[in-house]
Image: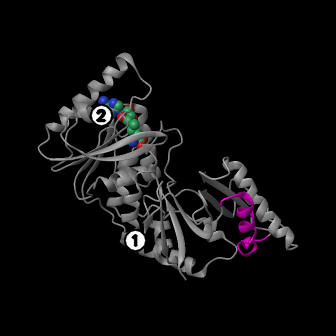
Amino acid sequence: MSLDLVVTCARGTERALRFELEQLGATGVKGTGRGAVELPTSWEVAARILVESRIAHKVLWRLLRLEASDEPELISGLLSFPFESYGGRDDSFAVDAHLHSCPWTHSLFAAQRVKDCLVDRFRDRGLERPSVDTKRPRLRYVFHWEGSQASLSLDLAGASLSRRGYREPNAAAPMRETLAAAILALGHADVQRPFLDPCCGAGTLAIEQAWRALKRAPGLGRQFACEFWPHQEQALSDALRDVRVSVREQQLTELPAPIELGDYHAGAVQSAELQIHAAGLGRYLAPKRRDARKLEAPGERPVIVSNLPFGERISGNNRLQLEGFYRTFGDRLRALPTARVLVFSGHPDAESLLDLGQPRRFSLMSGALAAKLLRYDW
Ligand SMILES: C[S@@+](CC[C@H](N)C(=O)[O-])C[C@H]1O[C@@H](n2cnc3c(N)ncnc32)[C@H](O)[C@@H]1O
């Protein structure tokens, strides 16, 4: 049986996701535009994506595709969907809705209308309806309506795959784990080369690099919503079991090259320590309190990766200070004989202030802010 999957990711990282999925055995991966790709695939590949993808946010099993240019057409299509085959009275559910250029404009209203269709379908068949649980439902439906194309999917993982389980709740605006992994993939942060993040904040980039280097699968320690579905797909359970065994066997116990990280704020270093510990990396990573303007290479041919402060809310002297920081940091990097440098920043003048020559540029988002990944090699 061929599964119709939609895999979502941060905007701007679709190409890196597509490459990653192909490495995991997927074929026929197509971009769908904003932050998603689609592919026809098997349960084996779906299981590998759930356990091994570093860049994917959600893995959606698309069950229904509809042509609908107005509400009556949509509702009649949704009422024809056999909701009762996927869960009964005892299986709580939730609906998330995503709308783009379609007759409905409010996603909460849309989610409510899809929920009503499910309830009507149960009632019309004399069945007891399941209850809604928006926090921890057994089945999470994802409804998407764009133009005249609508679809209904089930979320295989339940919660975003970016939740690796090491996130420190008190860290000051840590980077999303999947974005960090995408930056490392897009920037070819070679795990065989010494690595340094001199402005590490809570340490997400270094943690993701260490997991890559140790071949630690990000989903190994978690369970997925599909494992609790009432009608479990035997092929999926078997595939998940096999993938877990094989990724465990492939894990390394030593880093191929050193990974260093530092920050000049004591609070950031403390958050990084907590995240490193939660990620099971206490033996490998030791964040230091250091000033990036005095950066020293962690070894020969280093990979230096940093998410620099954007300065989106500062002005006056603070702005000048930040610009001075970018210039000094650029000077320090330029003094290294060889390096691969990856700078992730939303500062509009990052490139000219660093003055490191022509970078390769990738347009990404940092939450709601536009940002760029700049890659330099010399
Ligand atoms: C955007 S945050 C990095 C967030 C990080 N990627 C994470 O996931 O938590 C930028 C960091 O640069 C640090 N920083 C600013 N100036 C610095 C300097 N001169 N030396 C070292 N770190 C600095 C800040 O303390 C802050 O933690």
For the magenta stretch, what is the residue range? Answer: 69-88
Under circle 1, the secondary element is: loop
Q: Is residue 194 above or below residue 151?
A: above
Colouring convention used in this rendered image of the protein: one colour
The CA span between labels 1 and 2 is 35 Å
Say the numbered circle drawn on residue 186. none
Q: Is residue 19 visible?
A: yes
Residue type at the position of mark 1: Leu
Q: Earlier in the sequence, mark 1 or mark 2?
A: 1
Looking at the image, the residue that sits furthest to the right is 126
Q: Quadrant location of residue 250?
A: bottom left
Left-right relation of 334 to 140: left
Under circle 2, the secondary element is: helix
Q: Is residue 282 visible?
A: no
Q: Which residue is mark 1?
A: 24
Residue type at the position of mark 2: Ala
Q: Percent x, y for residue 138?
A: 69, 64
Residue at the image position 44 percent from the left and 53 percent from the top: 178
Q: Which residue is mark 2?
A: 350
